[in-house]
Image (cartoon, grey):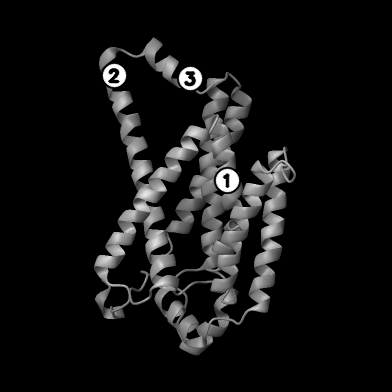
């Protein structure tokens, strides 16, 4: 199955177009790999080494750690690539490792009580639970859907316990975070009252935009598929759904959007 796309390229594309497509695929691959390497090195250097191992590290030391981390991430990636049997397995493993921490990484923007201990617990637990249920025979869950549900539920229980058993972030930290980001929703009502600052955006309206965008995107995609597969009834149904989503989104976008404040700038700096 993985060779289907290259075979179609060879069979149906002219030499010139084939070269352009191959070059674009190589460029996309290089971009993805370089981004992953830089992200991994940045995580190790800034979030682990400088924060927990050596907070007073100098810039040359951080540069050295970053370079060594880049080599480490590259070597680990190469080993994983050689051990992988197919792309689908790797893709499922990546999803399994990262799915458990998704909820807490979203909720931290909507609820002040989510602290660093909860986030760290979610990330670490998601990695180990995902690896165990994907690779360890004694704990492996063959059904991918059940595996994702189990990982999400288990990791959620762990990070909620960690959050409740550890102290909250200091009021100064929470207020500074709120001043910088001005998040919406009821989860930051306490900081909103203390600072006297209104949220930068309306959470309810943002959720409506998400729903409208979902209608627009899925309506357009499924309508196109319906017409291409000669199923006009399905095509028209989803086309109407997409148009409704587009109209809804346009109405929501007509409302005035306040600019997001940036540290160091006053309200008068925004035009």
Measure how far apart labels 2 and 3 are at the Cα level.
19 Å
Name the residue rendered at 51%, 36% in the picture.
220
Residue 133: x and y, percent?
68, 46
Quadrant holding the C terminus: bottom left
Answer yes or no: is residue 224 visible. yes
> Disc 2 or 1, which lies upstream in sequence?
2
Q: Is residue 252 above or below residue 239?
A: below
Disc 3 packing (10 Å; few <14; some 14–19; many ≥20): few
Taking the image as shown, residue 106 lies to the left or right of residue 134, namely left
Taking the image as shown, residue 260 lies to the left or right of residue 61, namely right
Disc 1 packing (10 Å; few <14; some 14–19; many ≥20): some
User: Residue beneath label 2, please?
Assistant: 17
Residue 107: quarter of image: bottom right
Measure how far apart labels 2 and 1 are at the Cα level.
34 Å
Taking the image as shown, residue 137 lies to the left or right of residue 15, namely right
> Disc 1 or 3, which lies upstream in sequence?
3
Q: Is residue 180 above or below residue 46?
A: below
Label pair 1/3, CB-CB below 8 angstroms: no
Give the farthest residue toward the bottom: 194
Measure how far apart labels 1 and 3 are at the Cα level.
23 Å
Q: Nearer the viewer, residue 60 or 133?
A: 60
Q: Nearer the viewer, residue 13 or 225?
A: 13
Q: Which mark is residue 95?
A: 1
Q: Secondary structure at mark 1?
A: helix
Disc 2 packing (10 Å; few <14; some 14–19; many ≥20): few
Name the residue rendered at 55%, 57% in the picture.
208
User: Residue beneath label 3, please?
Assistant: 3
Q: Secondary structure at mark 3?
A: loop
How many numbered discs? 3
Name the residue rendered at 24%, 66% in the picture.
60
């Amino acid at each position: 199955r993985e060779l289907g796309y290259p075979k179609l390229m060879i069979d149906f594309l002219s030499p010139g177009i084939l070269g352009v497509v191959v070059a674009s695929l190589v460029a996309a691959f290089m971009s993805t790999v370089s981004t992953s390497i830089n992200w991994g090195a940045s995580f190790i250097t800034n979030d682990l080494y400088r924060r927990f191992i050596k907070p007073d590290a100098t810039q040359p030391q951080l540069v050295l750690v970053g370079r060594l981390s880049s080599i480490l991430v590259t070597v680990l990636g190469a080993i994983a690539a050689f051990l992988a049997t197919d792309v689908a397995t790797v893709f499922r493993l990546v999803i399994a490792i990262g799915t458990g921490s998704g909820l807490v990484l979203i909720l931290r923007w909507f609820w002040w009580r989510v602290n660093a201990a909860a986030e760290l617990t979610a990330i670490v637990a998601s990695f180990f639970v995902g690896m165990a249920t994907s690779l360890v025979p004694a704990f492996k869950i063959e059904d991918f859907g059940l595996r994702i549900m189990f990982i999400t539920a288990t990791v959620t229980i762990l990070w909620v316990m960690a959050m409740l058993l550890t102290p909250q972030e200091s009021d100064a930290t929470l207020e500074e975070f709120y001043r910088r980001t001005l998040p919406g929703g009821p989860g930051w009502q306490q900081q909103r009252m203390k600072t006297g600052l209104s949220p930068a955006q309306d959470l309810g309206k943002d959720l409506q935009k998400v729903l409208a965008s979902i209608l627009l995107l899925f309506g357009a995609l499924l309508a196109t598929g319906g017409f291409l597969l000669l199923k006009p009834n399905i095509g028209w149904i989803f086309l109407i759904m997409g148009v409704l989503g587009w109209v809804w989104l346009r109405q929501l976008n007509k409302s005035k959007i306040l600019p997001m404040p940036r540290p160091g700038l006053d309200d008068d700096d925004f035009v």
